[in-house]
Amino acid sequence: MLKKLLCLMVVSMLAVGGCGKKAEEKMMEKAIEQDTGDKANVDLSKNKVTIESKDGGKIEIASGGDTSLKVPDDFPKDVFVYPGAKVEASIKTPDGVQLTLVTSDAMAKVTDAYKAKMKAEGWEEKTAAAMGEMTMLQFEKADRTAMVHITKDGENSRIMLMMSQEKESK
């Protein structure tokens, strides 16, 4: 349910386009809080949503027309982020982080770069699958997994980079 809500929130943020209207922000916060029971902070002027759960977990979503979106400062330094790619969205959860990037470079060039750079950082390629206008890569390093989906988007390549870390068993 929370994943569905997060997708809805990102779409909603894109639709209102950072208008910053306090009434809309409050309405979205209330809807999230009623649906999840968690505290939400919506700031449409910055295209950001933060949801804090009762157990201390935090979800941060940044998306939309904001050209100042960037890779989060705490993003792992050993995970390759395609140079010059525009950050369109960033979602941080207690389980990991997801970036949506766009570049004008061809899919093959992006794919080759991810394979080479991740290997150079000590990541082991576990899966590589090319299906027409989509390539999926999976890398592992210690207790972490990186999934890279590269798709053709008109003249551009869209990169979905998902990082997760295995939780310790209790």
Image (spheres, grey):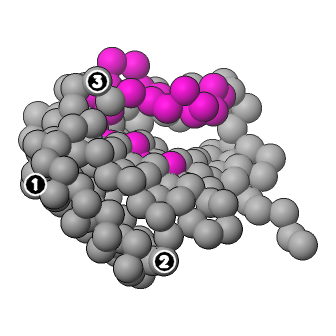
Viewer-nearest residue: 45 or 122: 45
Q: Residues within 10 Å of mark 2 (few under 14, many from 20)?
A: few
Which kind of residue does numbered mark 3 sit on? Ser
**Which SS class for mark 3?**
loop
**Which SS class for mark 1?**
helix
On the image, the x and y values in percent for residue 79 come to: 59, 32
Mark found first going from the N terminus, 2 or 3 = 2
Viewer-nearest residue: 8 or 157: 8
Per the image, the residue denoted by label 2 is: 37
Extreme residue toward the right, this view: 170
Residue at mark 2 to residue at mark 1: CA–CA distance: 25 Å
Is most of the magenta stretch helix, strand or loop? loop
Image point (84%, 63%), residue name: 168
Image point (23%, 55%), residue name: 25
Image point (50%, 49%), residue name: 92
Q: Residues within 10 Å of mark 3 (few under 14, many from 20)?
A: few
- Is residue 169 placed above or below 12 in the rendered structure? below
Mark found first going from the N terminus, 2 or 1 = 1
102 horizontally vs 160: left or right: left
Per the image, the residue denoted by label 3 is: 68
Viewer-nearest residue: 98 or 36: 36
Please say whether residue 30 is visible from this viewpoint: yes
Mark found first going from the N terminus, 3 or 1 = 1
Residue at mark 2 to residue at mark 3: CA–CA distance: 31 Å
Which kind of residue does numbered mark 2 sit on? Gly
Image point (32%, 52%), residue name: 42
Q: Which residues are magenta?
A: 70-92
Q: Are marks 2 and 1 in contact (CB under 8 Å)?
A: no
Please say whether residue 135 is visible from this viewpoint: no
